[in-house]
Amino acid sequence: MDKEIIHKAYILFLSGIKDENGIVRANDNNQIIGIKFLNNSSKDYIVYGYYKSGQIRYHYQYKNGKCHGDNIGYYKSGQISYHEQYKDDKLHGDCIDYYESGQIKYQEQYKNGELIE
């Protein structure tokens, strides 16, 4: 995620420009981006991406400016496409990719960015 977009969104957030859910949306390369700050710190936030239809495409969690928590992607149908877990910017936990039917394509586990075999 571009730090400049996050900075601009944070300024809009502090200015009161956000929707009823506290999400700031900005147009970036014809893609709608939503950022929800979890507190008055630009280091803790959730990034939302949307298809042109308005359907959610993904959401990523950040803590202290680092990817931390569940990152989930969605097909246009609304089904989950992938689910990854991060800790301090590194894959940590399950990493699952799904077919649109909901069946698992593959599943891997990571610890501190290293694949567990």
Image (spheres, rainbow, N blue to C red):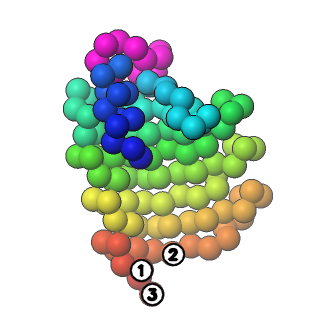
Asked if 77 appears above or below 21 in the picture, the reply is: below
Location of residue 97 in the rendering, given as x and y in whole percent from the top left corner: 61, 65
Q: Residue at x 22, y 32 (%)?
A: 41
The residue under label 1 is which amino acid type? Leu
Do the residues under discs 2 and 1 have CB atoms within 8 angstroms? yes
**From this viewpoint, which residue is outermost toward the top?**
16
The residue under label 2 is which amino acid type? Glu
Question: How would you rate the neighbour count of disc 1 (Cα within 10 Å): few for under 14, some for 14-19, many for 20 or more?
Answer: some
When asked about the image quadrant of residue 101, the answer is bottom right
Q: Give, as a single range, the part of the protein colored magenta.
A: 13-22
Give the left or right position of residue 86, taking residue 50 as reference: left
Do the residues under discs 3 and 1 have CB atoms within 8 angstroms? yes
Q: Residue at x 40, y 74 (%)?
A: 110
Do the residues under discs 2 and 3 have CB atoms within 8 angstroms? no
User: Of helix, strand and loop, which one carries label 3?
Assistant: loop
The residue under label 3 is which amino acid type? Glu
Question: How would you rate the neighbour count of disc 2 (Cα within 10 Å): few for under 14, some for 14-19, many for 20 or more?
Answer: few
Q: Residue at x 54, y 29 (%)?
A: 27
> What is the C-alpha distance between the residues marked 2 and 3?
8 Å
User: Of helix, strand and loop, which one carries label 2?
Assistant: strand
When asked about the image quadrant of residue 49, the answer is top right
Looking at the image, tell me whether mark 2 or mark 3 is earlier in sequence order: 2
Q: Residue under label 3, please give it.
A: 117
- Asked if the magenta segment contains residue 64, the reply would be no
Residue 115: mark in rendering = 1
User: Of helix, strand and loop, which one carries label 1?
Assistant: strand
Q: Residue under label 2, please give it.
A: 108
Give the left or right position of residue 14, taking residue 116 as reference: left
Residue 38 visible in the displayed image: no
